Each structure stands twice: as structure tokens, then as C-alpha cells.
Image: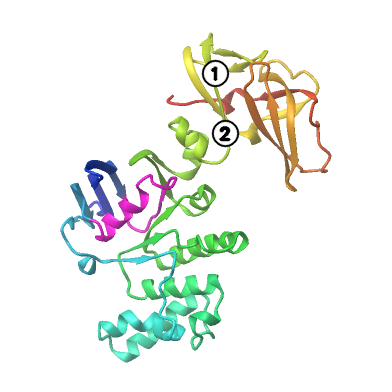
Amino acid sequence: MTELNAIELEDVVKEYLSHGEVVQAVKGVTLEIAEGEFFSLLGPSGCGKTTTMRMIAGFEEPSRGVVRLHGKDVTDVPPNKRDVNMVFQSYALFPHMSVWDNVAFGLKQKKTPQDEIKRRVGEMLEIVDLVGREKRRPREMSGGQQQRVALARALVNRPRALLLDEPLGALDLKLRQAMQIELKRIQREVGITFVYVTHDQSEALTMSDRIAVMNDGLVEQLAAPREIYERPATAFVAGFIGTSNLLKGTANGGTLKIGGGRVLVPGHEGDVTVTVRPEKITIGTGEPEPGVSSVRGTVSEMVYLGTYNSYSVKLPDGAEITVFEQNAHDATATAERGDSVWLSWQAQHSYVIGS
């Protein structure tokens, strides 16, 4: 027997009335989220990702379409009747309660026996690494610790799925990066389906099993992180996920003539849009060997960023290419601002969008 998906959206639309006009925040989203998957909804502000999550939670009702949880149609079911919990960016902890009482709150509301509350809260505090801090109040804890309390409070109720709406947004960069690893560890340990909303590309790439990249109410690509990064389906995805160079032109015999050089796109003819990632490009002052894509330009900017140098190189036709040069051996830059350079990369690193 095939296992049911944890969550299914079928042609879900959400419309609002704004100044007398109908506005579509979500435009026919269809997707399936597997049991135990860490699934991210990624996109810029206003793309419809939070509205989509709120429809899964039941806080918003679709204008059209179907929401299913574990095979059951819950489109018209209120939030408190859905077996999902939600964690918000604000955490929404009870300030007058201890960590223990915050985590135990839902179980007490359900009149769970005391010995089971003690066992389940203890287990959850161990998973989120808060043992020894049970008596503290939220104000006595760091942002990262408060976030763990909010997670424990949601997970202790053993929901079939946990929905997280930008829960790391209020944390500083270093703590946010540490918590990304922790969240993935916790999700793996408890085995619950996580649906995560974020506008942070690195966050989604770090934690997710699969990502739905949203733009203007639509899913532009749904795939594993590596697939989305290496083989973006649209120009929007290529530009939104990390840094990408987009090159447009007409391919003739599998070659695109750009900026006094050539870009190899084997098997492609006619008008194409090519994306190549900055870290795939080699920068040098000598002419590259035959058999690679190579273009010539002038360094317009060079920035030292510790682990790598970032170059902006202007081609003769005015196009700008970004190059990342890893500081693997020393921090000496290959080129400086104003230098004439060659850029080269292997043919397989030119990905034709839509191919």
C-alpha cells in the first residue's frame, strides 16, 4: 500500500478584494509533501508563501481548490481540528510561565495525565537541548533558546506536521546559521513533517529535502536543493537562489558569441538564456585553453570577502559577470580593478534555462 502524503494542495487559489478589485495572492498551487519531509516554501515578500502556509494551517480558507492532510479533505476544517501546529517568528511564549510550563501548556489543556506530561516534556526538552533550564522565564533566555522553547511546545503535542513561519528571522546571522543545523537535527530526530516558510535562500538550501520556489502566487520550481541551484527552471529561480550570471544570445552550432568570446552550449540552437554560477568560473590574465567557454572583460570591482574574492567583470558589450575566486591557498587576488582578464568555465557549467 502506498503511503499517504502528509499534505496535498490541489489547484489552491486565494483571492482578496482590494479597493474594489479582485487580487490573487495564490494562483492555483498544486503540490505534495511527503510524510517526514522537511519542505520549504521559498520566495520574496508578497509571493504567496505565507498565505499558502496559512491555508494549510486553516487560518485562511482557499477561494478555490482542495487542502488534504494525510489523504483527508480539510479545506473547510477549522485550525483547532487539524493535526498540525504552527511556530511563528514572534514565538508567542507566555512570559509569566517557566520553560517547563510553556512546553507543558498544550498537554495540560488536553488534560493529559501528569506522569505522561512529565515524561513527554522531559523528552522534548532533551531533544531541544534545554535540560537544566526548566525553571527559567522567556525573558531570561536568548533568542535561540526562546525559539527552542517554542519548538518544544509545538512538538510535545505530537502533531502530524509542524508549520514554521520564518521562525529564525529575529535572530542574528551567526545564531541563525547555528539554528538552521539544529532545526534539521531536531526534525530528523522527531521524524515529523516540517513545512518551513522563508525568504532566505541559504536557509532553505541548508535544511530542506525539497523546496518550492514561489513568485507572484505561483510555484516556479519544486525540486531538491541541488537541482534548484544547479538546474534552475526559470530566470527568476536562477537569480533568486544564490548569485547567478544570466547570458542571453543566439546559439549557432552549440556556441554563443558573447563579449569577444564564446559560450559553449552543446546541442542548443537559436535564442537561449544561459546561467553560470560565479564559483564555476576561473579568472586569469592568460588566454584559456581551447575547448572551454571563454570571454574577455575588464575588472570593474574586486572585493575581498575572507574565504573568497568577488569580482565584477564588465564585458565589451556592457554585460557584467560576477566571479567568486576561492582563497584556498593564499589571499592574493588574481586581478585588481581595471585589469583586463579572461573568464573561462567548462561547457557543462553553462545551463540553458528551460532545457
Who is closer to the viewer here, 144 or 350?
A: 144
Q: Position of residue 287 (x, y in %)?
A: 77, 18
Is residue 34 part of the magenta span, yes or no?
Answer: yes
Residue 105 location, quadrant: bottom left
Who is closer to the viewer here, 134 or 311?
A: 311
Is residue 186 part of the magenta span, yes or no?
Answer: no
Residue found 68% across the figure and 24% down from its top: 314
Say above or below: 301 vs 136.
above
Point out the residue furthest to the bottom here.
114
Say above or below: 106 vs 88.
below
- From the image, tell me which residue sits under label 2: 244
| Mark 1, secondary structure of its residue | loop
Q: What amino acid is labelled 2 in the image?
A: Ser
Q: Position of residue 346 (x, y in %)?
A: 63, 25
- From the image, tell me which residue sits under label 1: 265
Say above or below: 193 vs 216.
below
Residue 174 shown left or right of residue 254 in the figure: right
Residue found 43% across the figure and 48% down from its top: 45
Bounds of the magenta segment: 33-60
